[in-house]
Image: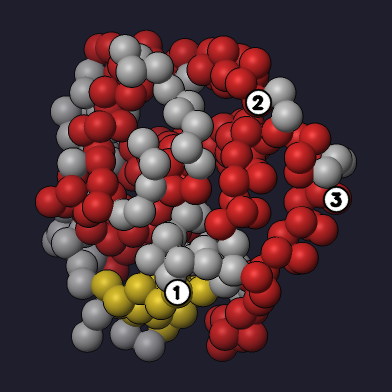
Amino acid sequence: MPIKMYDLAGAEVDRRFSPFCWRTKMALAHKQLEVETIPWRYADKAALAFANWDRVPVIVDNGKPVVDSWAIALHLEETYPARPPLFSSAPSASRFYNSWADTVLNPAIARIVVLDIFNHLAPQDREYFRRTREERLGARLEEVVKDRESRLPVFRQLLEPMRQTLIAQPFLGGDAPLYSDYIVFGSLMWARSISPMRLLDPADPVEAWRQRLLNRFNGMPRKAPGYW
């Protein structure tokens, strides 16, 4: 029986753009597990009532709901130890990347692509998204993104520690990708899925790393609708 995964979708049902869902999709592929994705939208909160949760990703594994991308990764590692490991040692070694992406990387990306997200949403999601994001960001979406091109150099500088790591090795996990890679890659897949604005310079080692991950799992990430 495949694992069921509730996955955030835009107006186009195959445009899946949540950074947290991309972490989970990559983790499931890494573990070589069969998955059935179920499109979910912000207006569908009642669909997750069975899990006592209101956002995605949510997976159902052998009848058991598991919520939150980090908790899902831990569940997969514990439940399927014979399959390729997501962590090089203790999961705590990847916790830095999880916290950094949640508190630094994702907020920076949001201020660049938030209006693009709105433009890709199903009609029933737009009022909720605009209201909650404008409350969170303290301005209208149009104001938030109006100077985004000028902020690209600052955004790229945020990636410098990661860049220096990738100069020395092909993946954050070392010679092969691990969950630490999927955490950060999920954030960039978020932007790729809904915005034509390229966040990375083509010569950046981070871009070379992203291209390597786009090719993983028979090109599954690259085949997803996106812009760059």
Q: Quadrant of residue 87?
A: top left
Q: Which mark is residue 135?
A: 3
Q: Quick one: label 1 or label 2, which is nearer the N terminus?
A: 1
Query: What's under tag 1, amino acid-wise?
Result: Pro
Q: Secondary structure at mark 1?
A: strand
* Front-most of residues 197 and 49: 197
Residue 223 placement, left or right of 147: left
The percent position of residue 168, horizontal first and vertical second, equals: 25, 12
Residue 66 seen in the figure: no
Are circles 2 and 3 on residues that touch, CB within 8 Å?
no
Query: Which residue is rendered at x = 16% and y = 28% of the image?
Result: 175
Q: Secondary structure at mark 3?
A: helix
Position of the N terminus by quadrant: bottom left
Q: Quadrant of residue 120?
A: bottom right
Position of the C terminus by quadrant: top left
Query: What's under tag 3, amino acid-wise?
Result: Glu
Q: Residues within 10 Å of mark 1 (few under 14, many from 20)?
A: some
Q: Which color scheme did the rendering employ for the protein?
A: secondary structure
Residue 69 placement, left or right of 144: left
Q: Which mark is residue 39?
A: 1
Q: Is residue 117 above or below residue 125?
A: above
Q: Residues within 10 Å of mark 3 (few under 14, many from 20)?
A: few
The percent position of residue 118, horizontal first and vertical second, equals: 65, 54
In three-dimensional space, the C-alpha distance between marks 2 and 3, rounded to whole angstroms, equals 19 Å
Query: Which residue is rendered at x = 46% and y = 79% of the image?
Result: 65
Q: Quick one: label 1 or label 3, which is nearer the N terminus?
A: 1
Q: Which residue position holds label 2?
A: 148
Query: What's under tag 2, amino acid-wise?
Result: Arg
In three-dimensional space, the C-alpha distance between marks 1 and 3, rounded to whole angstroms, equals 26 Å
Residue 42 placement, left or right of 29: right
